[in-house]
Image (cartoon, rainbow, N blue to C red):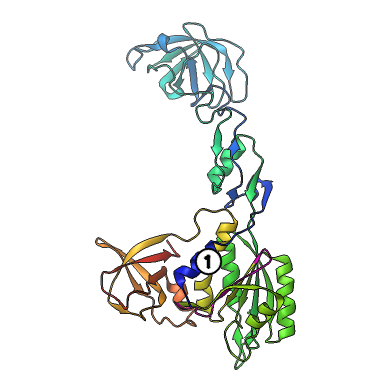
Amino acid sequence: MLSAKEAQDRVTDSEVRIRVKKVHILSSLHLTLAEDIISNDFIPAFDNSAVDGYAVKAIDIIGAEKNYPVKLRLLKEDIPAGKVPLDSLEPGMCIQIMTGAPVPQGCDCVVMKEDVLKEGKDVLVFKECRQGDNIRLKGEDIKKGEVVLKRGAKIYPPEIGLMASIGASEVPVNLPPAVGIITTGDELVDVGQKLQFAKVRDSNSYTLAAQILESGAEFKRYGIVPDDKAVIRKKILEALSECEILLLSGGISVGDYDFVKEILDDIGAEFVFWRVNQRPGKPLAFLTFKDKFIFGLPGNPVSVMVCFEMYVRPLIKKIMGDSKLYREIIPAKALDTFKHKEGRTDFVRVFLEKTDDGIYFKPTGMQGSGILTSMSLADGIAVFPEDKETIEKDTIVDVLIFKQ
């Protein structure tokens, strides 16, 4: 049986097919760039005023202060944003200018509006400026021909604004995979149905769908499938024809009604591994089918969520070209001493507490694979390594962060 680390490596070492498509920049949010983005323009495209005020020559207002203002002649023209200046600035003169407007020829600084007093055709300047003050220079943000975003960059709102500023309305991105979800079991009923004796509502397909969305991918739910070989086989083939990753919840163990492993073997899927030395989620399978991937997940809700975080999410991120495959991992100290089975990796749902001595963790309570509230309460998952039987108080372990 593989260790958790060996199983993770086999998943993330898989060869993946990355699909690239040009999309509108607003559709690129949280995706990854497939190519460098190069500017064809200077940004700003021209020298412009950073403030509302008056375009002047710095030499004309040397020594200007509150008690000894400098008087300048005000030209009739004013320059709002978007207007091309018609006049050039001569010595002893100034022109009213607005934020973002091109500075006129001869201007080398802009006095802020609050530092002047207008008197008819003249302006009194109460503060001197140096050359370049309050002027945004052509190309000071971006040069023409400059790589503004590199291939592999994750796109957030600032990146969208940056691409808009250089006129990149469509950009090539790595497309997220389509992930199919099939839940199996005669005991399952949908969320809207009344709960009857011996029945269980299907929470797994909803938590998986939410995890898929949070990872940046797209999901398709294929509904609840009864424990019937023919029906399960048909649904699996349908999902594999439409999705790049298929998640099967339940039916992967060794019970009399667990048909999934047999069906996957029968359709020609190749097992990369089956069963992992971990808790929760031991009966985990990972398979390939042509250029598709299949995860046979356990049926218990906590096992499903943990296996998604540790194995499915990294594969989704790799297909998306994301360099960060796992969630943020931080070191945290054990608040108390904990025992676990040596030789097995335990994924423990924990609270986190920040103190002056560092960040501490403690379990959220009962750690059964059916206790879904333990995931809701958890700030993250502490990884108890397989080579230790006891996690002593103050021992540092890795914790994957779910919530900030």
Q: Is residue 341 left or right of residue 93?
A: left
Q: Which residues are magenta?
A: 278-292
Name the quarter where the C terminus is drawn.
bottom left
Q: Residue at x 66, y 78 (%)?
A: 265
Instruction: Give the x, y percent position of residue 21.
Output: 68, 49
Residue type, label 1 = Arg
Q: Residue at x 39, y 76 (%)?
A: 364
Does residue 190 appear in this view? no
Q: Disc 1 designates what residue?
A: 10
Instruction: Give the x, y percent position of residue 154.
Output: 54, 49
Q: Residue at x 64, y 78 (%)?
A: 183
Q: Is 81 above or below relative to 172? A: above
Does residue 147 appear in this view? yes
Seen from the viewer's position, the closer of residues 55 and 312 is 312
SS class, disc 1? helix
Q: Residues within 10 Å of mark 1 (few under 14, many from 20)?
A: some
Q: Is residue 154 left or right of residue 61?
A: right
Instruction: Give the x, y percent position of residue 40.
Output: 62, 30
